[in-house]
Image (tube, rainbow, N blue to C red):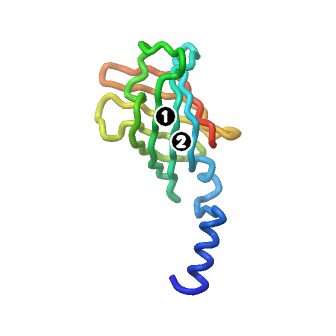
Amino acid sequence: MKGPALGLAALLAALGCSSLPAELEPFDGTFDYVAFDSDGARVLEGRLVLNVGEDGSVTGTWEIDWAPGADQNTVVGPQVGNGSLVGNVTDGDLFANLNPQIADNNVFLRGTYVGNQIAGAWDYSTLAGSTVGDFTAAKR
């Protein structure tokens, strides 16, 4: 790009204008993550960074640790630590795999954007079965 086109592109980037369709924009960004066990007890806290493509594809990163005072014997799967994630947004719903590089032993997030957060369920899935809980991810 040269001249006025380059200036306009720089201005739009500086103003934070997104080329994402409006229905995808809420899912793009940094979120404070909180996970609850099946009894509703807070067990995990952390951060999700979601990068949404124009086609609804999602890539990103996560950093999650035990919530203060949480029972660290609670089965939550490999969602303690950090890593990359992949997924998609379809019809206002997020699906994300926190462990895309692993064939078994995965944590999946399924949620809907409501208000200023994504709310839904996490599912720790293995060949032996699954463990589930709820989560919220509030946009920063």
Left or right of 109? Residue 5 is right
Q: Is residue 66 above or below residue 21?
A: above
Left or right of 71? Residue 40 is right
Residue positioned most to the front: 68
x, y percentage for residue 7?
60, 79
Q: Amino acid at mark 2?
A: Leu
Left or right of 114? Residue 110 is left
Crowding around mark 1 (Cα neighbors within 10 Å: few <14, some 14 to 19, many 20+) is: many
Cα distance in 3D space between marks 1 and 2: 7 Å
Measuring 56% from the left and 36% from the top, which residue is drawn there?
111
Closest to the observer, 90 or 98: 98
Q: Is residue 48 above or below residue 3?
A: above
Residue positioned most to the bottom: 3
Residue positioned most to the right: 115
The numbered mark, 1 or 2, whose residue comes first in the sequence reads 2
x, y percentage for residue 57?
47, 52
x, y percentage for residue 2?
53, 85
The residue that mark 2 highlights is 94
Helix, strand or loop for disc 2:
strand
Helix, strand or loop for disc 1:
strand
x, y percentage for residue 93?
57, 41
Q: Amino acid at mark 1?
A: Leu
Q: Mark 1 and 2 residues: CB-CB less than 8 Å, in contact?
A: yes
Crowding around mark 2 (Cα neighbors within 10 Å: few <14, some 14 to 19, many 20+) is: many
Q: Which of the numbered marks, if any, corresponds to residue 109?
A: 1
The C terminus, quarter of image: top right
